Amino acid sequence: MNYQRTAVQSQSSSGVEKVFLSSWRPYCWIAFTGILLYCPAFFFNFTQFDDDFLILKNYDFLSKLQNIPVAFRQPVFDLYYRPFLTVSLILDAQLGHLSPFIYHLSNVLYHVIASMLLFGVLTSLLNSRSRGFFGSVLFTIHPLATQAVAWIPGRNESLLAIGIFSSFLFFLSFVETKKNITLACHLLLFFCALLTKETAVVFPFLCLSYCYIFTAAKFSWKELFPVAFSWLVVIIIWYEMRDAAINHAISSENLVSMQSFFGNIPIFLELAGKTFLPVRLSAYATVSTVSTVLGVAIILGVASWLVNRHENVNFRQVFFSLLWFALFLLPVLFVTPTTNLRRYDYLEHRAYLPLAGIIFMIASLVRTNEHRLKSKILFPVIAAACLLLSVIHQQHFRDPLALWTHAAETSPKAAHAFFHLGILYEDNSGDLARAEQAYTTAAELDPNNSEYRNNLGSVYAREGGQQRAKEEFQKATALDPGNQFACYNLGSICFIENNFYAAESLWKRTIAIDPKFSNAYEQLIQLYLNERQREDAEKIYRLAIRNEIPLEENLKRVFRITRP
C-alpha cells in the first residue's frame, strides 16, 4: 500500500517536472510569467520622473545612432558613468521615437532576460533545476522588482543584473573547467556591468567569497591571482573611462561619505524587510519609523527561524546569499541622500540585484523531497500574493499623475513629491485649487525652497490674489536671488501695480541671470515703448538679437532693423 502511494507520487512528480523543468521549458515559463504580469506596462506613459530628462529632453541626442560612441564619453545627470543605459535608450529611440511603448517593452524584456539568467545561476549554485525554477519565478514576480520594470529609468538595474548574472555564470564555469575562454567571457561581461552601473565594482568580492565558501578545497588560491589581476585591469580601464567622461561635470566629491553610510543604515533595514514582506512599497521612498521597525522585526524573525531549523539549513548557502544582498546594496549606503525635506531617501529599484541574494536563500531552504504537501500549498499562496502586489504596484507608474500622487501618499514628508504634483495639477489639468494645496504642502515641508514659493505665487496670481502672489515672489527672490522665474514674476506684479521702475529693475536682473529668458526681453521692450523710451527699447532689442532670442513679430516690425 505504501509502495503504491509512493509510486503514484513519483509518477505525478515526474509529470510536473516534464512540463515545467525539462529542457528549455523553464525559460519559456519564466518569459511567459514575466510578460503576462507586466504586459499592462507596455501601454504606460512617461512619468516625468527622470524619464523626462533621460528621454524627452534628450531626444535630439538619442535619435542619432551615431551618438552611441559619444555615450561612452559623457556622464548621466553629470554624476554617473552609465553609457549602457544611454545606449539602450538610443536603440529604443530608433524604433519607437518618442512613443513610450517601445521603452516599456524593452524594460519588460530586460527583466525577463535577467530572470532567465538567474535561473541558470540558481540551478548551478543549488544543483537543482526545481529550486532554481522556484527562485527565478519568485524573482520574476516579486513586487520589489516592479519599479525596475514598470519605470523606464529603472532598466539600469535589470541591465546591471544581466551583466552580473551572465558574468557569474561564466565565472562558475571557469572555476569548474579552468578554461581561458570562460574567464575571458566572464571579464568581458564584468566590464559591461561596470559600464552599466558603478555598483558592479563589488562583484569581484562576491566571486572571491564564492571560492572561499564553496570551492576552497578544489580551487587553489594561487590560481586566483591571475584572475584577481585581470579584475584589477578591468576596473582600472573602466575608472579611466569614467574619469575622462565626468572630469568636466559637476563634482561628485561630496556624493559619497562614511557619514552617509551610518545615516543610511535604516535604508538597509527597510529594504531587507521589503524583500521578505513587500508591503509599504513606494516609488519615492522616504525612511519611516514604521518601515524601519518592520524591517528589524522581519530580520530578527528570519534569524530566529534559521536558528530553530539549523539542522535543515545549509548555512554556507545562507551566508553567501546574505553576503550577496549586503555587497550589492553596500554602495547605495555610502551615497549622500538628497535633503530629506525635499526628495526621496532611496529608490526601491536599487534592491533589484540584491534581491537575487535573498531569492537564493529562500530557494536553498526549499526541500523538494521533504514536506512536499507544505510546498504545494505554500508556493501558490506566495506566488498569488506576489502577483497581486506586483499588479497593483505597477499601476503607480502608468502616468505622471499616478506616480506623483502615489509618491505624495506614501512619502508625506517628501516636499518634492508635492511640488511635482502641484505642477501636474497646474499645467496639465488646470486644477488651481489642488495645485495650490500641493504647493502649500511643499512649502510647509521645506519653507526655504525658492522654487516652491515661486510656483505657489504663480497659482495665487492666476487666481487673482496679487498681494499673496507678490509676497511669495518676494520670499522666493530673498531665498534665492538667482531664481530668474521669481524675479520675472515679481517684476510682472510690479508692472501691474504701475511700479515701472521696480519692474524694469527686476526684468533686467532676470536677463542678467538668464540671458535666454525671452519673456523678459519682450516685457522690457514693451515697457520702454510705452514710456516712449525708444532708445532704451532699441538697446534691449539689439541685445536680444545678439543673444539669438526669438521675439514676437510685432516687435520686429516696430524696429525694422537687422542683426547688428
Image (cartoon, rainbow, N blue to C red):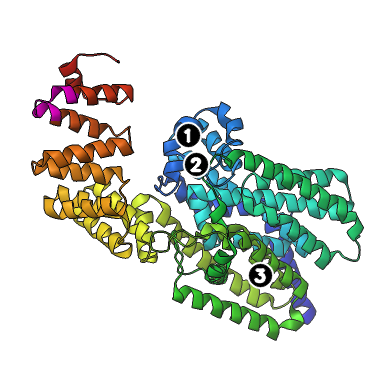
Which is the main secondary structure of the residues drawn in magenta? helix
Name the element at disc 1.
Answer: helix
- Mark 2 residue crowding within 10 angstroms, few (<14) / some (14–19) / many (20+): many
The residue that appears at 73% across and 67% down in the rendered structure is 320
Is 34 inside the magenta-drawn segment?
no
Q: Position of residue 231 (x, y in %)?
A: 78, 49
What is the CA distance from the residue labelled 1 to the residue labelled 2? 7 Å
Residue at the disc numbered 3: 362
Residue at the disc numbered 2: 103
Start-end of magenta stretch: 528-537
| Amino acid on which disc 2 is placed | Tyr
Corner quadrant of residue 233: top right
Name the element at disc 3.
Answer: helix
What is the CA distance from the residue labelled 3 to the residue labelled 1? 39 Å
What is the CA distance from the residue labelled 2 to the residue labelled 3? 32 Å
Is 275 left or right of 392, judged from the image as shown?
right
Name the element at disc 2.
Answer: helix
The residue that appears at 24% across and 36% down in the rendered structure is 508
